[in-house]
Image: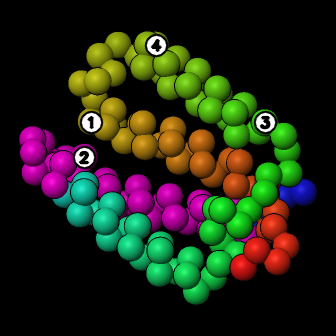
Amino acid sequence: MVDWKFGSYKLIWWLIAMVMCLPANFISGWFQLIVLVIILLVLFSATFLFEKKKPQLKEKNRQTTISYFRGICFLLMVIIYFAVTQSITDFYNLQFSGMFPLLCLALLDILPSFFTKTIPNEY
C-alpha cells in the first residue's frame, strides 16, 4: 500500500531542507558549518512543532508495509553513491559534490516513507 500523504510530507521536507542548504554549498570554511548548523536547528525546530500538531506524521507512529525495504534502499543508495563518486573524475572538486550526499540521504528517507502506514491508537 502506498502512503501518499506521509511520502509527500517527507518529500516536501527534504525539498525545503535542500533549498535551505543550497546557499551554504557556495560558502567555504568554518562559516559553512555554522550556517548549516543554524539551518538544521531551524528546520528541526519547525518540524518538531509541526509534528506536535499532527502526530500521525511522526516517524515513530509509522509502520512499514514492505519488510526490509529500508535496508534495501540503504544498500542501493550506497551502491549509487560509490558508483557516481568513482565514475566521475574529480568528483569532489565539483560544486555539486557537497549536495550529493544530502541527495542520497533524502532518497534513502523518501522512498521507504511512501510504503508505511499509521500505527492505530498510538497518538
Task: Work out how far the residue at label 4 is from the one at label 3, CA to CA, in angstroms.
Answer: 28 Å
- Residue found farthest to the front: 122
Task: Work out how far the residue at label 2 is from the one at label 1, CA to CA, in angstroms.
Answer: 7 Å
The residue singled out by tag 4 in the image is 87
Q: Main SS type for the magenta part?
A: helix
Q: Which residue is drawn at 46% across and 13% down?
A: 87
Q: What element carries label 2?
A: helix
Q: In this view, does 37 lie to the left or right of 54?
A: left
Q: What element carries label 4?
A: helix
**Which label sits on residue 25?**
2
Percent from the top left, x then y, of residue 17?
41, 60
36 or 41, nearer to the observer:
41
Q: In this picture, which residue range is highlighted in magenta?
A: 5-34
Q: Which amino acid, by three-letter code, is at mark 3?
A: Tyr
Q: Which amino acid, by three-letter code, is at mark 2?
A: Asn
- Judged by depth in the image, the label closer to the viewer, 4 or 3, is 3
Q: How crowded is mark 1: few (under 14 residues within 10 Å), some or many (20 or more)?
A: few
First in sequence: mark 3 or mark 2? 2
